[in-house]
Image (cartoon, grey):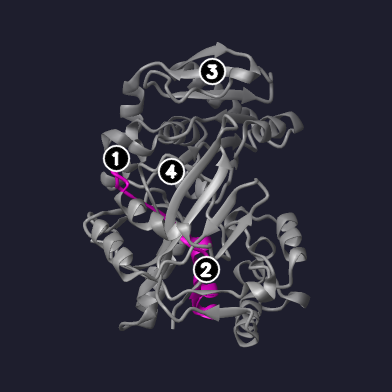
Amino acid sequence: MAEIQPLRALRYDLRTVRSLDAVMAPPYDVIDARMRAELAARSPFNVVEIDLPEATGGGDPYLHAQTTFDAWRQQGVLVHEREPALWPATQRFAGPDGAPTLRSGFFCRVRVEDYGPGRIRPHERTQPGPKENRLRLTRATRANLSPIFSLFPDAAGEAWSALEPATAEDPFGSATDSDGTVTTVWRCTDPAIIDSVRATLADRELLIADGHHRYETARVYADEVGGEGEHRYTLMFLCSMSDPGLEVRPTHRLIRDLDDERRRALSDAIAASFDAMAVPMSELSPQPDADGSVQFGYLPAATREPTRLTLRDPATADIALDGKPAPYRRLDTAVLEAVILRDALGLTEDDIARQHGVTYAKSVREAEAAVESGAADAAFLLRPTPIDLVREVAQAGMPMPPKSTFFFPKVPTGLLFNPLE
């Protein structure tokens, strides 16, 4: 079973940096150049200086991260906790309907081990580039800088019930991100609470929601160092799969670089396998409860006519995904990848991983703008993947296509670090 331990965290000294708002950042993989510049301008101690490093004059970014991280520790910008602790955290945000929503979880460290039943499972395919980047950064800083977000089954909410009394105390800190999400973190060193949480999760399997590249990097690094020690653990934020604030949003697909032949192939595949219905743009996104059928919103640049596509025959998915587990064949993202991206457009898994011919949009507005501007030849709008289906696919041992889920909100980087030596 997954081994969960309290964390002797390395953290910012709030007397030095003044507020977590100034120093925290989203995970590195959602930060573009403009956002990085904005974050770095907030404070010379913003976490992007070490988690998404840039060296002046074309220097080595990993050396920049190492020297900056070491300097912050020497200067007391970062301080090392004396006691191991679990770190309860809440995230308050606006749901899709604007209603206030609360997600609860806790930071800890988890022993790094191979994927497998009863331990830790992935749910999406990974790419080689980010793993190499994260490995070089881990070697340079000898720390986990950004937490992995993982889920565990806990229908009765036992873990949070044990931790919640600790949130009656003053928090360690609170930070608000650009989306308005307020993340508040407490320190819990009470041995009885820690033991209770660990006992609750002793037989639970962890499912990685966000941070597959970071986890696989942690595995490589642990084996590279060898032996036992702090490097055998990695920083995680854990949340119950039954938490009322657990929200999964869709990531939409943008099709690019279509020539005439591929454009015809796309039209033929849609005509052969899908029922098409014109809909207003406001109704283009398929509804989560669409009677179990596979559906997409489709917006082609050629006509700019919003269209709802519904898979005509489930056997199409069974044939295209022959050999895949039954839960996998119910995934909208898997059907789109097999029937449209692979069979019609000829894209390989490597093409998709490297975003050759397909890119992504996190909102309908962003997807529509890409089609209107000509940046995309077509957009496919998807619905959120239900968390129960995510779990079923993971338990079947089949990683989902990239960007099949977008867990919202993201867990910030910069709240806590996990030293590896």
Sequence order check, earlier mark of 2 and 3: 3
Number of residues whose C-alpha sits closer than 10 Å to that of mark 4, classed few (under 14), some (14–19) or many (20 or more)? many
Pinpoint residue 196: horizontal percent, then vertical percent: 27, 61
Residue 288 vs residue 201: left or right? right
Spatial CA span between label 2 and label 4: 30 Å
Asked if one can make out residue 111 in the rendered structure from this viewpoint, the answer is: no
Q: Which mark is residue 308?
A: 3
The amino acid beneath tag 4 is Pro
- What residue would you read off at disc 4? 401
- The stretch of residues the image draws in magenta is 128-157
Q: Residues within 10 Å of mark 1 (few under 14, many from 20)?
A: some
Disc number for residue 416? 2
**Circle number at residue 392:** 1
The residue that appears at 29% across and 64% down in the rendered structure is 114
**Outermost residue toward the bottom?**
74
Q: CA distance from mark 3 to mark 1?
A: 27 Å
Mark 1 or mark 4: whose residue is earlier in sequence: 1
Decide if residue 290 is in sight here.
Answer: yes
Q: Is residue 313 magenta?
A: no
Q: Secondary structure at mark 3?
A: strand
Position above or below: 13 against 196: below
